[in-house]
Amino acid sequence: MRGRGIAAILLVVVAATMPPAGAKPKPKAAPVSLYLHGSSPVGEIDGMQNWSNIITGEPLTFLPMTPEKPSSSTDKSFGIGPQGDDQCSGNPVLPTWDAKVQGTIKGHMKLRVTLLSYPAPIHIRVFADVDELSCDLDYDNPVVEKELSPDPGLNDYTIDLGDATTHISHRLILMISPNLAGAGADGRVIYDSTAHPSRLEFSCVPDKGTAGCAAP
């Protein structure tokens, strides 16, 4: 009889810990890779076109960052020069990418990127749910940021940007700039090719009712 009693208790415990019949399992964190893309071989052309949208009354846009892997064998590049205001939550005349993201980022965020540069410090920042050109007094603090002093020449980097745990309602913006505008730092971000698929990586729990954290 004692054995039957223990078995009954175990059945009650198991039943209490099981989800209700028909209940959907909670979404789990899944890896997300957002690849840096562009339209022109030289990113400055895209940047100036995006900037000119303001003059024509069109919405300001940045370069796209999506889960789609690059398919071209030809590199694109964007200069990391002292042009523009770097105290902005994204600036189209600096290397800046924009992604549609909805969900909760968990843990550290990494940037895998190819840089052509000389050893001058650059600033890498990721912003969440900010308006375009939130600059100076309207500047929004990034979710994560990192300063890097690249080695001279063409090199691949895997950069741990730190703990990015936060909820994202609609967008992530990545900006790479000189450490200080006007400091003379220069170099180029290499991206959007099969040889140099620069990308932002993190784990994310998608919001309820969504297929995933990142839109194509």
Image (cartoon, grey):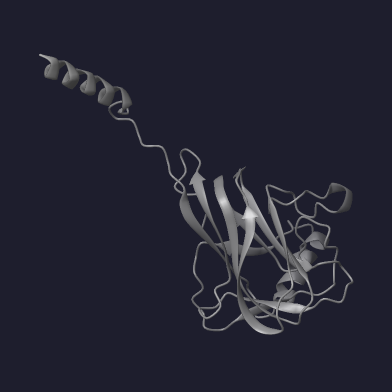
Judge from the rendering whether residue 187 lies leftward or rightward of residue 7; answer left or right.
right
Judge from the rendering whether residue 194 lies leftward or rightward of residue 188; answer left or right.
left
Residue closer to the observer: 123 or 168: 123
Q: Residue furthest left?
A: 1
Residue closer to the observer: 23 or 124: 124
Q: Is residue 50 above or below residue 89?
A: below
Q: Is residue 159 above or below residue 205?
A: below
Residue closer to the observer: 163 or 89: 163
Q: Quadrant of residue 3?
A: top left
Q: Is residue 84 above or below residue 137?
A: below
For the image, the number of numbered tags is: 0
Q: Quadrant of residue 113?
A: bottom right
Residue 213's spot in the image, x, y percent? 51, 49
Q: Residue furthest top?
A: 1
Residue 154's spot in the image, x, y percent? 65, 84
Q: Residue at x 78, y 71 (%)?
A: 121
Residue 130's spot in the image, x, y percent? 72, 48
Q: Residue at x 80, y 55 (%)?
A: 133
Q: Quadrant of the N terminus?
A: top left
Asked if residue 2 can be seen in this view, the reply is yes
Q: Residue furthest front?
A: 2
Residue 206's spot in the image, x, y percent? 49, 45
Judge from the rendering whether residue 108 lies leftward or rightward of residue 143; answer left or right.
left
Q: Is residue 97 above or below residue 25?
A: below
Asked if residue 101 can be seen in this view, the reply is no
Q: Residue at x 46, y 47 (%)?
A: 29
